[in-house]
Amino acid sequence: MSLLEGHDRRRYNLPSHEEVAIVFVGDDGAPPASREIVIYLRGQPLRTILSMSANLDPLVYPIFFTRETAEDIDSLISAEIPDPAVDPELFEIIKSCMIHRPCGILNPNSPCIKGGKCTKKFPKEFNPHTVAIFNGYPRYRRVDNGRIVNIKEGEEQAALDRAAQRDTHLTACIVNGKHCKWKVRQRGSNKVIVRMYKVSPIGEIFYLRMLLLHVRGAVSFEDLRTVNGTVFNTFREGCSHLGLLQDDAEWRNTLTEAAATRLPNQIRQLFSIILTFSDFNLPTLDEFLDYVPQNEEEDVQVLIDEANRVRPLLNDNQRQIADAILSALSEQPNNENKQSRLFFMDGPAGCGKTFTYNYLIAETSSRHIITATAAWTGIAATLLKKGCTLHGLFKLPVPILENSTCNVTPNSIHGKFLRQVSLYLLDEASMLPKHALNAIDKLLQDVCINKFPFGGKVILMVGDFRQILPVVKRGQPADIVEACIKCSQHWQYVQRYSLTENMRVQAEEEEFSQWLLKLGSGTLPLKADGSFCGCIEIPEQCLLGENESLVDKIFGVAEEDDYAKRAILTPNNVDSLAINEEVLDRLPGDVKVYLSADTIKTDDLNEINNFPVEFLNSLSPSGMPVHCLKLKIGAVIMLLRNLDLKAGLCNGTRLIVRALQNNYIDEQVLTGVSVGKRVFVPRVQLTQSDSNLPFTLKRRQFPVRLAYSMTINKSQGQTFDKVGYIL
């Protein structure tokens, strides 16, 4: 049985006839007394699910068996007094436990008497045969076999009197202490199931509950309040020092800890990150100065020399694209050329796309033409001169919908800057959804106060449709293609240029490079027969042996420094998290654990009470760090937020841990333009709105996760020496 991702597990979905595979019964023809229900989650091994789990409701459907016959009932139930000579043990059990005492006229004060009648319907009539009653209890066989049980008057009262004469618990303890020896009670099992009730997130009881969830082995309240050897006065202080609360004192502690050993410029950068990505319980200002990319004055002669140096190095295709862009910039937009100012440069990796638009940046800057460069991903943005993300440049909303608009007004400082730009270079455009392109078009028309496409600006989009396409949640291939800019209304006006000459590939890699190009273009032959009919055959040298482990293959004999140059790519986050944990265990050193402070974004206190903290801790949405972050010195990690693009700290930047402090992590950059730079990352406030959740999750945690394994989408723009794939 396959549990499809995206289906609501809480709803009762009516099964089709193909979902009911087989019904098992016991050896005697009866339904089995116990069962084990196993489900298969895609990409994971078989997993047993408890019969009491709420997730089981949409998986199991009741099947009503035919009614039992009278003979079946008689084989299980007997309403007769057994023969004491044949089965004396059973007779004594029934005599002691199953005989209904006198009631009615004989004993009107019996507990079973209500309204003058016995609620158990005693005495029962004799019945020679069992009769099954539809929609009711059967009438069991009660044969008059002459056997009786004598009940002497006063036996119950005598039993009560004997019980009253027994010592109480306190008296029994005193007697036991004088005349008996103490005996240690032997526990039958050390496994105990407990239930922790939800409490209001206000007061010490709530903080006590949080400590009980995270502190192991505590034997007293004092142990719960002890953190790193220090006993705190309240449970709240203990939670605060464990990082479980959103407390402004954390930022003061972070800066105090860094100021003891770090340089002033490093502390200033750390302070700027805290100001940008964290919330404070301070009065907010009505207005903030917008961050605007500044077109700083540069040495024009240096730019002219750079452009003159690079231009002879361009091949024919690159020179053709550059001339077309420069020609379009020399003309003012009008009704005749308004549809010919959109360009797209296509080419596989290594064909010189970055080389070409870096030349265009130098050439246009030397001519005092303002150029804005942006990329869909942070990693690609760090490779561009003065690059930023498309979300940052155009203030695109998240998520981007069909009718989304950018958060820029024409008369704002940022709107005036966009109006001054003549050339926009948009990298990784193959990942750009068409709705984002439409939103950019509307924005530039508004700020330029005209109806020309994109405000009459020259737009150069760069990308490779053989690589990652726009991300569509739970989308089929047709949905993903539909989201591409090729399906946009603007694509028909785009002038397309292609780069085909690979400038980086080595001679020994030419065959594999051509195979990848055919794979991306969809021209590889498909298998025509066998169980893999319609599939692509992967070269033998790329496959893992039958008894080989992918983790051993990639990281087995590597030195610690080589771990940063290797990675395992997976289709989903679940597999990558498991692989990261396995590789972390191979590293030497002690593990340091950082816990997040989780809550939901709401002003309704009753809404907060509906979602326990431990449930929020268990969530691991895409793009957010986990609640329990485990790190070691020397571990390779990846940033999950754009912190400082100029410094190369963007979403996807890989770093290596150099020191683990309580309030910040000391890291060294491994990729991008700031390789080797030491940076400090504090906890920041992260917000994630997942369409599968009925709330917006807020998590205060270090915006990093282990980077030995990552999703294929997250690897876009990364460079590795050795890569393994889980397909």
Image: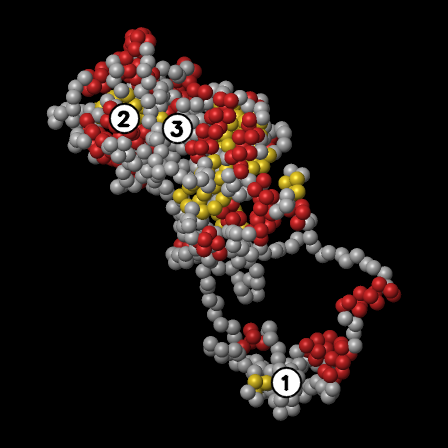
* Point 78% across, 74% down: residue: 166
Callout 3 amino acid:
Gly
Nearer the camera: disc 1 or disc 2: 2
Nearer the camera: disc 2 or disc 3: 2
* Point 44% across, 40% down: residue: 282
Query: In front: 506, or 111?
Result: 111
Q: Relative to residue 686, is residue 176 drawn left or right?
A: right
The circle on residue 378 is: 3
Callout 2 amino acid:
Phe
Q: Relative to residue 325, is residue 259 drawn left or right?
A: right
Nearer the camera: disc 3 or disc 1: 3
Q: Residue furthest left?
A: 336
Instruction: Indicate which disc, 3 or 1, sits on the residue closer to the N terminus.
Output: 1
Query: In front: 282, or 442?
Result: 282
Separation of disc 3 and disc 1 at Cα?
A: 81 Å
According to the picture, the residue beneath numbered tag 1 turns out to be 110
Instruction: Indicate which disc, 2 or 3, sits on the residue closer to the N terminus.
Output: 3
Q: Is residue 634 visible?
A: no
Residue density around tag 3, few if under 14, some if 14–19, many if 20 or more, within 10 Å: many
The circle on residue 417 is: 2
Helix, strand or loop status at disc 2 = helix
